[in-house]
Amino acid sequence: MNKPIVSSAAKGVFINNKWVPGASGKTVPVVAPAEGQVFAAITAGNAEDVDRAVAAARAAAEGGAWSRFSATERGRLLSKFALLIADHAEELALIEARDTGKPLKQARADMVATARYFEYYGGAADKVHGDTIPFLPGFFVTTEHVPYGVTAHVIPWNYPAQMFGRTVAPALAMGNACVVKPAEDACLTPLRLAELAAEAGFPEGALNIVPGLGEEAGAALSSHRDIDFISFTGSPEVGVLIQTAAARNHIGCTLELGGKSPHVVFGDADLDTATSVISNAMVQNAGQTCSAGSRVLVEKAAYDTVVQALADKFSKLTAGTPEMDRDLGPVINATQKKRIEGFFARAEDQGVPVLASGQIAEGTPAEGFFVAPRVYGPVPRANELATLEVFGPVLAVLPFDDEADAVRLANGTDYGLMAAVWSHDGNRALRVSRGIKAGQVYINAFGAGGGIELPFGGMKKSGHGREKGFAALHDCSQIRTTITKHG
Ligand code: NAD
């Protein structure tokens, strides 16, 4: 792989379409997960930088050029940005692959999805209609969706470019001005995307980025007195901090906090397809996907067949560097690797059987954060592998007795982000799917993170609010009702 020159590294903070030096003068080193070595640096944004970015966004949203764009003009601009992302897809994919460690083919697919967010919301910008509401005689009532004003976006490291597109595209489409705090572990593509947005023609202040540490730049942004809404994706712990900061400011937020998403597999399903989809989806992004289907619940009669198929598939999975382009890359950092290995060590102590383990390709740097994928089963129902989000390439298989037991088990964690039901009995599949508390449920398919058109978000402790689809446009705008009394 041609190692990308990272042009935007430590250039400063991106405000009013320009790089300006960070107030602290400090930087944060960026480590390539496949190499275990520092390869770039980002500016350590602080509260002063956040102040400047929020002020720029406020000026853009209220009276600035951005506030005068019609919905159609905003849509055209988003569509133009989508084309520019597509034109730069290979450059962006190389940066993303080195920054996150993911295989190049996955980074390339991520850039297609990132461009698609702007394409989709570009097309949608002028199609968000209000209502007319029948009311008392002599009154005429309309509603319209108006932007919040300044929206804050705190995004994670697992899909830096896609997460940027997922949260920023609908907010811009509705006319908000955005301030983004990308994750310190991987944020080089969002920084490059900001430059491309300026090139596409977004006016000053519409899109601003403050890179830096979560406890500094992230905390300053989420508690800033002059933001109107926060969108957050990341850990439940930081989600509490974000929601608390939003409450102190009396503003709204959307939270996407991950999951422990179940596949419910009945014996009458196409088990070969099901197990292929399940194992491939599980190792996508080395298992660091909020919507990863990390629990496989199997009807007892089919348990042996399913575990045999999953074990066969997992034993062939190989982790490698981005340029090796194998099934998965390394995990994001040393802490995450240690955390996952902690799950492995405790599972061994507790006697949870390993059904199969994949491998790490020869020639991967010893300093890289590689974890060989594993499938465990039968996992006891209360075991942490069956209840906690590992955020690594680890699958837990559990048998169930009957339909009622399957639904109980599927709903048996704090989370409710995604699920899949595998069965050729259409009535049963639909019945079971409707019993599962999850924001998205697939039947005979599974698309972790897929489908920009499809509303996505959590039930239960996976969070609240919806991204993707038209639902996101409604979530990042507010309804104004106009009540007119006529004679
Ligand atoms: P995190 O929640 O700490 O980081 C997510 C974002 O929040 C980053 O931009 C970070 O800088 C920011 N942040 C951190 N502390 C903050 C604070 N005090 N105030 C405001 N913003 C802050 O996630 P992590 O530590 O990078 O990962 C830990 C775990 O989170 C993972 O193991 C995984 O379980 C989960 N996670 C989930 C998702 C998801 O898509 N749902 C994504 C990443 C991580």
Image (spheres, rainbow, N blue to C red):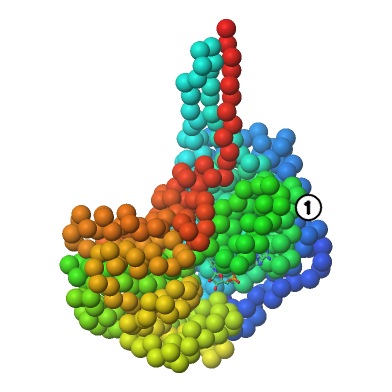
Name the residue rendered at 25%, 83% in the picture: 308
Quadrant for residue 150, please give it. top right
Name the residue rendered at 26%, 55% in the picture: 431
Point out residue 38 in the picture as x, y percentages from the top left corner: 65, 80
Count of picture labels: 1
* Front residue of this view, candidates 270 and 14: 270
Quadrant containing ligand 1 reads bottom right
Q: Amino acid at mark 1?
A: Arg
Quadrant of the image containing the C terminus: top right
Name the residue rendered at 52%, 78% in the picture: 331
Q: Is residue 84 visible?
A: no
Point out residue 275 in the picture as x, y percentages from the top left corner: 28, 73
Q: Label 1 crowding class (10 Å Cα cut-off): few <14, some 14-19, many 20+? A: some
Q: Residue furthest top?
A: 487
Point out residue 124 in the picture as x, y percentages from the top left corner: 47, 40
Q: Is residue 216 visible?
A: yes
Name the residue rendered at 52%, 72% in the picture: 97
User: Which residue in the protein does label 1 denote?
Assistant: 52
Q: Is residue 297 above or below residue 204?
A: below
Describe the element under mark 1 as helix, strand or loop: helix
Quadrant for residue 311, please give it. bottom left
Quadrant for residue 268, please give it. bottom left
